[in-house]
Image (cartoon, rainbow, N blue to C red):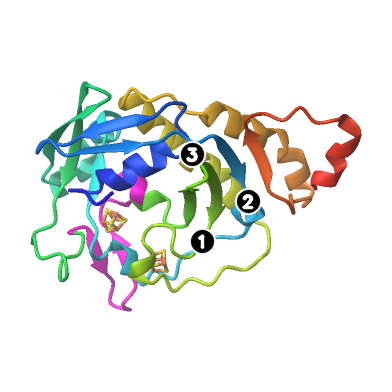
Amino acid sequence: MSSNYSYGKVMEYVASIATHDIEVMDEKGNIVTYVAPSKIVISPLFYRNDGCNRCGKCCRNYDICFTKTGYDIVMGSPYAKYTDMKEAHILINGREKTIYYDPPTSDNRSKVQCKHLKFNTEGMSYCNIHSVRSVTCKIPHMTLRHNKQGTTSISRQQYGRNWALGCTFEFSETFDYDTFLNSINELNDINVIAKDLGIETHYNLIVRYLNSIKKNLQNNIVPTKQKQVFPIIEEVKSSQSKLF
Ligand code: SF4
Ligand code: SF4
């Protein structure tokens, strides 16, 4: 979905783990329907080490949006003074919801970059609202891809946020526990947005599974096969060792 002010990206995240179909109507009356996934899997690539070269590419041609919780956090922070928040009112399954966005200073999308993107004297990018940035900024590499067969695959890829922007980071295939813990926080951020928008998700099932393998991960025993977290498959105990 192309959209104004990134809420299309936010909706993609939420819809990819939603329990029911979602119909979104924007302020112009355009309607987009998201079909709920019939299956959710976690790819082994989800567990690989993540990072960032601070090239700033993924903050170009980009803008940011928040739902109520994120908006309140920004406005209650010292970073509020850097923002110029606007509101968009959309209907989600017939109920009005407010999206808050901080538009770029230009409407020319081929030239524009997020107004919060800054560079230090060494040419490395930084964000002047880093600690209160939007969910689309927080998860540049975690992907929740919903295919035509109805399966959402949760993974980690260079082009998670927007492949066209050309992320320069090269993943290593090693596991990193802090990246994993951060991923759980990122999933929680998506769930907070879903709650703000009145959308029910399979977040609890996903995180319950991830928490269940924490001990294995701490011992560097990392899943090497795709794991289906929805619908739940009752597994025979003796076969569980084959998962890792
Ligand atoms: S808010 Fe910060 S992280 Fe997000 S796009 Fe702008 S500069 Fe990048
Ligand atoms: S494009 Fe990739 S390397 Fe560059 S700032 Fe974004 S996440 Fe980091």
The amino acid marked with disc number 2 is: Ser
Label 3 residue SS: helix
Residue 95 or 129: which is nearer the viewer?
Answer: 95
Nearest to the observer: residue 79 or residue 42: 42
Report the front residue among 25 and 5: 25
Query: Is 100 in the magenta?
Result: no
Q: Can residue 174 be seen in this view?
A: yes
What residue is rendered at 66% in x and 39% in y?
228
Q: In this view, does 133 lie to the left or right of 45?
A: left
Q: Name the residue under label 2.
A: 43
How packed mark 1 is, by other alpha carbons closer than 10 Å (few <14, some 14-19, many 20 or more), is many
- Magenta segment boundaries in residue numbering: 115-136
The CA span between labels 1 and 2 is: 11 Å
Element at badge 1?
loop
Q: Give the mark, 1 or 2, whose residue is nearer the N terminus.
A: 2
Viewer-nearest of discs 2 and 3: 2
91 on left or right of 15: left
Badge number at residue 157: 1
> Residue 156 lies in what quarter of the image?
bottom right
Of badges 3 and 1, nearer the viewer stands 1
Taking the image as shown, residue 72 lies to the left or right of residue 231, namely left
